[in-house]
Structure formats: C-alpha cells, structure tokens
Image (cartoon, rainbow, N blue to C red):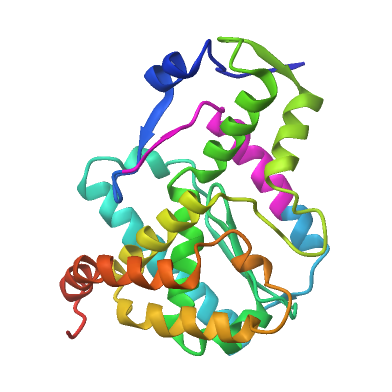
Amino acid sequence: MKFTHLLGIGAVALSAVACTTNPITGRSSLQIANNSEILTMSAQEYKTTLSKSKIIKGTADAKRVVSVGSRIKSAAERYYQSIGRSADLTNYSWEFNLIQSNELNAWCMPGGKVAVYTGILPVTKNDNGLAVVMGHEVSHALAGHGNERISQAMVAQYGGSILGGTISNSQWAGIFEKVYPIGSQVALLKYGRNQESEADQMGLYLMSMAGYDPREAIPFWNRMESASSGARQPEFLSTHPNPETRISDINKNLPKALEYYKAAGGKI
C-alpha cells in the first residue's frame, strides 16, 4: 500500500500549487501533505497517548478544560462560517482532555485533539489564563501548522524533486513521527518560532471571540516565564519567541483582540 502525496519540482512550483493563507492572521505557508492522512494519524496517536496517561474526569478542573475548549471551538466555527470557510473544519473531531502530569504543557493535534496537563493549571490560574493556553494550542491545528511542518520535512528529505510522487507507509510514518514525537512521556509537538508567534496572535483573537479577556495574556506569559525561571525550560516554551518579543507582539495585537472581545460581550 502507498500513500500518495503532492511533493513538487522546486520552491517556486511548490509555492504556486500549495500555498495556504491563514484567514485570521493572513500569513501564507506551504502545506503539501495530505490532510486526511494527517487527521487519521493524529487521531491514532491521540488515542495511544490517552491510553498511556491518567485522564482526569469529572473534577472542576476537568470540566473547566472542556468548557473553555468548547467555547474557543465554537468561536472558531462561527468565525470560519462568517467568512465562508466552514469546510476547513468539516473533518474536525474535537476532544478536550485533562492529563495528570506535573509538566507545564498543553497541546492540540491536527483535527482538534486537545490535551492539557495538570501541571500548567496553577500557572493559568483562571479561565482567562486557560483560554490563553488553549487558544494558542487550538490555533496550531486551525492554522495547519502540522501540515506545514510535515511539508517542510518532506521537502527537506526529498528535495522537492517528485511531483505527485508516492511515499511508502514507513516513510510517511517516519516523517509524521519526526514532527509529532508524542509517544514519549511528554508530548512535544515541534513547531518553529514563526508558527509559535502566529499561534500567539491567532490564539489571542480566538480567546477574545470566545469572550475571554485578552488582556490576561500578558500576565499569563509572565507567570510562565517565572515558573520556568532557574529551571530547565518547559517544553511548552521550547521554541517560543523570547519574552520581550512575545509581550511586544501581544501589545501590538491587543487593540484588534479587544474589538473581538467587545463584540463577544466583553467589558472594555
């Protein structure tokens, strides 16, 4: 059995046939991998990770994770519907789970498979802080960052030399696992800094659309930096922009975020 993937004959050709534009940030990216295959693999990996983890159910914190995640999901669906791109989310199958772990971490697989670790909850403090985290992680999925990273790995490995070529099961699995090595104890989704910055911006807007106060983003990120001060940097921050850049970008994007927040009924 073979998986068929669109690769390309060069940077120009690849850009011409597979450039995707984020409808919220306007950023364009190369996404040449097959989304249906990514979603299938993501669902399998998510299920495997949950089977090896202690899932917290029925507690106030677990309910908060589901509630905040559901509001952000609904806000995203409303926005995509308003711009005529509901089809982008057709194959999403959302899940929100709280995992028992001391790690300061959270992640979202392509297709809306979200995990929040209990270790990050003392840093989020409240629903607004949790919305910063979950908005950021959901944004990775919505922006197609998984496809982008897989596409980058495909081009790096195959040189963009095959257009409409085939990749074997093992080759495809190897590329996927390089981008999403989540079989280990800590789920580390490897994104680049441009993608992390975009997730900061998009997440800020999504939490605002969902009715959470975007002004809480700066205090949250400050708490994250303090929590990791003097210790090994948590995986959640491993490829993120430096603190000064992040705060500067948030301040730049805050006026627009506040417009979304006000439209959602928030008090300015």
**Camera-side residue: 15 or 108?**
15
Check residue 34 for magenta coloring: yes
Residue found at x 72% / y 28%: 172
3 to the left or right of 52: left
Q: Which residues are magenta?
A: 27-46
Quadrant (top left/top right/bottom left/bottom right) for the N terminus: top right
Residue found at x 64% / y 32%: 153
**Camera-side residue: 144 or 234?**
234
**Camera-side residue: 160 or 23?**
160
Q: Where is residue 75 drawn, in percent x and y?
A: 32, 62
Magenta segment, principal secondary structure? Answer: helix
Instruction: Classify residue 206 by image quadrant.
Output: bottom left
Residue found at x 67% / y 66%: 235
Quadrant (top left/top right/bottom left/bottom right) for the C terminus: bottom left
Q: Where is residue 33 drawn, in percent x and y?
A: 56, 28
Check residue 238 for magenta coloring: no
Instruction: Classify residue 121 by image quadrant.
Output: bottom right
Instruction: Classify residue 89 by image quadrant.
Output: top left
Is residue 177 placed above or below 159 in the rendered structure?
Answer: below
Residue found at x 70% / y 37%: 176
145 to the left or right of 253: right
Residue 115 in view of the camera? no
Q: Where is residue 41 drawn, in percent x and y?
A: 68, 40
Is residue 82 placed above or below 169 in the rendered structure?
Answer: below
Q: Where is residue 191 drawn, in percent x and y?
A: 58, 50
